[in-house]
Image (cartoon, rainbow, N blue to C red):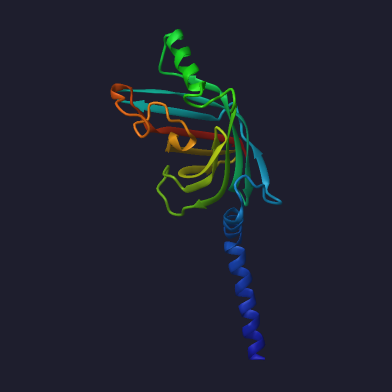
Amino acid sequence: MKKLKLFALMLVGAFVMAACGGPSEKAAEISERLEPGERPENALVKQIDLNRSTVAWEGTKVGGRHDGTIGLRSGELYLVDDQIVGGNIIIDMQQITVLDIENPETNARLRGHLESDDFFSVATYPEATFEMAQLVKHEEVAEGEPNYTIRGNLTIKGITHGVSFPAHVHVHDDMLTAKADFDLDRTQWDVRFGSGRFFENLGDNLIHDNFNLKLDIMAAR
């Protein structure tokens, strides 16, 4: 009889622990086993608000810098228990803009160069994609600090590499936001123009291999 009571208590304890820790563990386990871009069964799918989401870029060279934005064509986030477990974003490379140059002719010249085969070959590769999976949530972080590590596959110019970066993800009452600020090595995607790694004696024409991306993604909850 005592053994039966002990067994019953153990079962109750197991159910209590599952009830307390189940949702977050479930989301973490689902995200961990997902392939990049894979949509899990029974996940809540949220479409990215294209009008309120932005991708900003910044590139630097010897003695200077340029910055701008890149358009978004579509995107969706996959939620389980109010946690992002994956997603898929399509970037519109035909919507590259330059923000730091006011002169229209100079602005158009740089934009055209970025669209050319020296950089992103936009005519051949009008889209880039970022397929998310294996998101890791960090507990007990300071307010406003990155609380997730986002991993996934980034495809530019038909070349795919795995990337990982910190992000701050927040679920409001009616809105989900994800912000990230990180650097990438452009040469991994065969963007070599002005790179000291591939060309010699560039002098003031040297362009740094790392460029910065800032993501500000919003979706209705």
Q: Position of residue 50 (x, y in %)?
A: 60, 28
**Quarter assignment of residue 128:** top right
Against 151, is 69 above or below?
Answer: above
Against 55, is 19 above or below?
Answer: below
Answer yes or no: is residue 174 visible: no
Against 122, is 148 above or below?
Answer: below
User: In the picture, which quadrant includes the N terminus?
Assistant: bottom right
Q: Position of residue 117 (x, y in %)?
A: 51, 24
Report the front residue among 205 and 151: 205
User: In the picture, which quadrant includes the C terminus?
Assistant: top right
Residue shown at 41% from the left, 28% from the top: 58
Report the front residue among 29 and 154: 154
Residue shown at 51% from the left, 52% from the top: 136
Report the front residue among 8 and 42: 42
Residue shown at 65% from the left, 39% from the top: 46
Residue shown at 45% from the left, 8% from the top: 105
Number of marks present in the image shown? 0
Image position of 137 (left or right of 65):
right
Image position of 45 (left or right of 159):
right
Q: Position of residue 147 (x, y in %)?
A: 46, 48
Which residue, as the protein is rendered here, is positioned at the far right?
42
Report the front residue among 47 and 14: 47
Q: Position of residue 13 (x, y in %)?
A: 60, 74
Answer yes or no: is residue 173 visible: yes
